Image (cartoon, grey):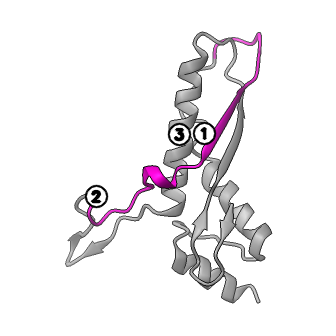
Amino acid sequence: MSVNRESGQIRVYKVVCAVDCGNIVNPDTIKAQMEGAIIMGLSAGLKERIEFSGGGVKSANYHNYDILRMSEIPEIEVHIVVSNEALGGIGEPGLPPAAPAVANAVFTATGARLRRLPMRPETVLSGIKNSK
């Protein structure tokens, strides 16, 4: 992960995750689910924001609702824990920790503790300025 201190742009290059969902039926499904959830979590944490204007929703479609683009998706490495526990399902466990992990990495890189999502460039620059 890198943070451009001049533009406030965050770039995530690689995500490594481990998941224990009990007995494994189809590892490809687990991997795909984790990859999708991580991408959704990163998109929500870095870009997604519904905006309102004139008493209604301004973010009508993808032309004015920013999401993570394919070119911005990091390498994702999924490790599946071999377990004899009961089936637990896979659901969305990759989504909730994505944004906090990036926020912690930003803190490590810059000393700025970001507590507001999305972590768009203006949020990052404000956090860096306020951390001094």
- Per the image, the residue denoted by label 2 is 62
In the foreground, 63 or 48 = 63
Report the label total.
3
Q: Secondary structure at mark 2?
A: loop
Percent coordinates x, y for residue 72 in the rendering: 51, 55
Magenta span has 73? yes
User: Which label number is shown at residue 23?
Assistant: none
Question: Do the numbered discs 3 and 2 sit on residues whose CB atoms are within 8 Å?
Answer: no
**Disc 3 residue type?**
Ala
Q: Is residue 102 above or below residue 75?
A: below
Question: Do the numbered discs 1 and 3 sit on residues whose CB atoms are within 8 Å?
Answer: yes
In the foreground, 115 or 78 = 78
Measured in 3D between alpha carbons, the distance from the residue under mark 3 to the one under mark 2, in whole angstroms, is 19 Å
User: Which label number is shown at residue 37?
Assistant: 3
**Disc 1 residue type?**
Gly
Question: Do the numbered discs 1 and 2 sit on residues whose CB atoms are within 8 Å?
Answer: no
**Disc 2 residue type?**
Tyr
Q: Going by the image, does 7 lie left or right of 108? A: left
Measured in 3D between alpha carbons, the distance from the residue under mark 1 to the one under mark 2, in whole angstroms, is 24 Å
Percent coordinates x, y for residue 1 in the rendering: 69, 60
Q: Secondary structure at mark 1?
A: loop
Q: Residues within 10 Å of mark 2 (few under 14, many from 20)?
A: few
User: Residue at left 69%, top 88%?
Assistant: 130
Magenta residue span? 63-87
Q: Earlier in the sequence, mark 3 or mark 2?
A: 3
- Per the image, the residue denoted by label 1 is 94
Measured in 3D between alpha carbons, the distance from the residue under mark 1 to the one under mark 3, in whole angstroms, is 5 Å
Q: Quadrant of residue 5?
A: bottom right
Q: Quadrant of residue 90?
A: top right
